[in-house]
């Protein structure tokens, strides 16, 4: 029997306290029971790693799926695996990496659940080579908002609505996906300084490594605009001197002066200079390379009590001038950003509302403030004008008018949702804010 609790009284995190009720089932039958009994307003919550309001449901019910984390089947020959929705990407790498298999796509944190990875069609450092997460999913068992249990294949319209559909088609009961064979659970990593955005673009284009990612000094201007460090990696079975470590906790909220423009500029300059001019190579645990921020528990406290906003966009391959304009406005804004990431994306995506598209994706963090929100609005407009998109998993600020501009299949998505969930039970604060399930003028 599923127990519903007052969300404000649970120990399940402040993010859930906007909900009136929350349940955390531990078995598939309990999940179905909770979904059916949730009432007219229901939201799904996995590991809570979305930065915005995609998994929040003010005034409604929330079902937490993180305890449904079992591996149901695994084929050692083909690498196909079936898991419950709460299975964590990092856990799959930990358990199957030593056996020569890895999740096909890994986002920046290993805490993301498989259902969350599907709902956001996540991408990783290997998108240019392997596409998005949803492209490796072979089957989804879905409990719809209308109370049906469906088995979905990639050719099904409801499959394409569920992948990237931010949890609005129903709850994933289980999923089958193809793991990727790897040489070992270590990574051979090459790190090089990139003196400018142009150098980054050229290096990404010429790289033949499976994994590639760039840290960008978002405070650099002029001739050094977009400078940073490019990391390229491949899995390897070579021994590593570096061991996987337990996460270190951030014990307090950082004081505001640590995020002043002068301090961040100095930090970024020192971080850039730590790599020798001729670069370096090393062997690291694959998990440490794929999930660098997981080494710091509660790393968001580095942004102080007010937290941060993260802006992430993708622009087409030929829109490098728009990318340059976004970086220049961010650098010239006076808002300090110690973390900015650049990646190259290939053409792959699997869903109607998927974020990935071929081009360049840029991520920039800003301390939470009205000036940051205003800046992010301008940066998003630049990306959309270039034919790009903003990542819903990271968003809390987009206007509803942006969604149809980013996603030409929005009407088809809405039609699938209406068919699977005619009473509109599956929702979230994001779905209401962006009017994803109904027209902006509705």
Image: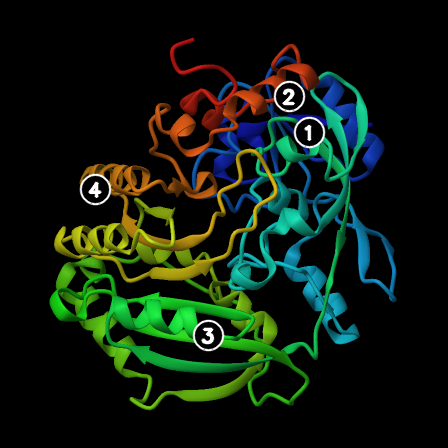
Question: What residue do we see at 72% from left, 23% from top?
Answer: 144
Of the two numbered discs 3 and 2 on the same chain, state the one appearing first in sequence: 3
| Residue matched to label 1 | 157
Q: Are marks 1 and 2 in contact (CB under 8 Å)?
A: yes
Foreground: 62 or 144? 144
Q: Position of residue 165 (x, y in %)?
A: 58, 33
**Residue 442: % across, % down:** 43, 8
- Which residue lies under the disc numbered 4? 375
User: Where residue 318 appears, x then y in whole percent?
Assistant: 33, 53
Residue position for label 3: 207
**Which numbered circle lies on residue 416?**
2
* Left or right, residue 406 beside residue 93: left
Label 3 environment density (alpha carbons within 10 Å; few <14, some 14–19, many ≥20): few
Q: CA distance from mark 4 to mark 3?
A: 32 Å
The answer to which of 222 and 319 lies nearer the viewer is 319
Disc 2 is placed on an element classified as: helix
Q: Position of residue 174 (x, y in %)?
A: 78, 41
């Amino acid at each position: 029997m599923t127990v519903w609790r007052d969300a404000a009284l649970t120990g399940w995190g402040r993010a859930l306290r906007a909900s009136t009720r929350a349940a955390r089932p531990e078995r598939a039958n309990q999940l179905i029971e909770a979904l059916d009994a949730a009432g007219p307003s229901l939201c799904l919550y996995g590991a809570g790693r979305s930065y915005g309001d995609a998994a929040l449901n003010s005034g409604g019910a929330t079902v937490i799926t993180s305890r449904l984390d079992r591996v149901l089947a695994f084929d050692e020959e083909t690498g196909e695996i079936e898991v419950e929705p709460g299975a964590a990407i990092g856990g799959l790498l930990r358990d199957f990496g030593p056996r020569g298999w890895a999740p096909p796509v890994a986002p920046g944190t290993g805490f993301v659940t498989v259902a969350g990875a599907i709902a956001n069609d996540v991408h990783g450092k290997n998108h240019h080579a392997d596409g998005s997460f949803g492209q490796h999913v072979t089957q989804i068992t879905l409990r719809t908002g209308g109370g049906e249990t469906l088995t979905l294949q990639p050719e099904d319209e409801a499959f394409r609505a569920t992948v990237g559909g931010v949890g609005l088609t129903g709850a994933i009961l289980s999923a089958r996906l193809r793991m990727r064979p790897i040489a070992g659970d270590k990574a051979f990593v090459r790190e090089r300084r990139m003196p400018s955005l142009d150098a980054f673009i050229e290096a990404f284009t010429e790289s033949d490594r499976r994994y590639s990612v760039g840290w960008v000094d978002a405070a650099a201007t002029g001739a050094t605009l977009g400078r940073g460090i490019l990391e390229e990696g491949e899995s390897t079975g070579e021994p590593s001197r570096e061991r996987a470590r337990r996460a270190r906790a951030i014990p307090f909220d950082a004081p505001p002066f640590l995020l002043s423009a002068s301090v961040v500029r100095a930090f970024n300059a020192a971080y850039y200079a730590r790599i020798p001019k001729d670069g370096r190579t090393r062997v690291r645990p694959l998990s440490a390379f794929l999930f660098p921020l997981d080494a710091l528990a509660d790393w968001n406290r580095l942004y102080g009590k007010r937290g941060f906003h993260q802006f992430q966009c993708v622009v087409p391959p030929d829109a490098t001038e728009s990318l340059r304009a976004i970086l220049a406005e961010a650098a010239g804004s006076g808002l300090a950003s110690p973390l900015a990431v650049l990646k190259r994306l290939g053409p792959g995506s699997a869903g109607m509302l998927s974020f990935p598209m071929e081009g360049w994706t840029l991520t920039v963090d800003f301390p939470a403030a009205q000036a940051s929100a205003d800046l992010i609005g301008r940066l998003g407009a630049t990306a959309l004008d270039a034919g790009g998109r903003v990542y819903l998993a990271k968003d809390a600020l987009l206007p509803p008018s942006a969604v149809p501009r980013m996603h030409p299949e929005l009407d088809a998505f809405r039609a699938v949702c209406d068919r699977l969930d005619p009473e509109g039970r599956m929702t979230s604060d994001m779905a209401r804010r962006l009017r994803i399930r109904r027209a902006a003028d509705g």
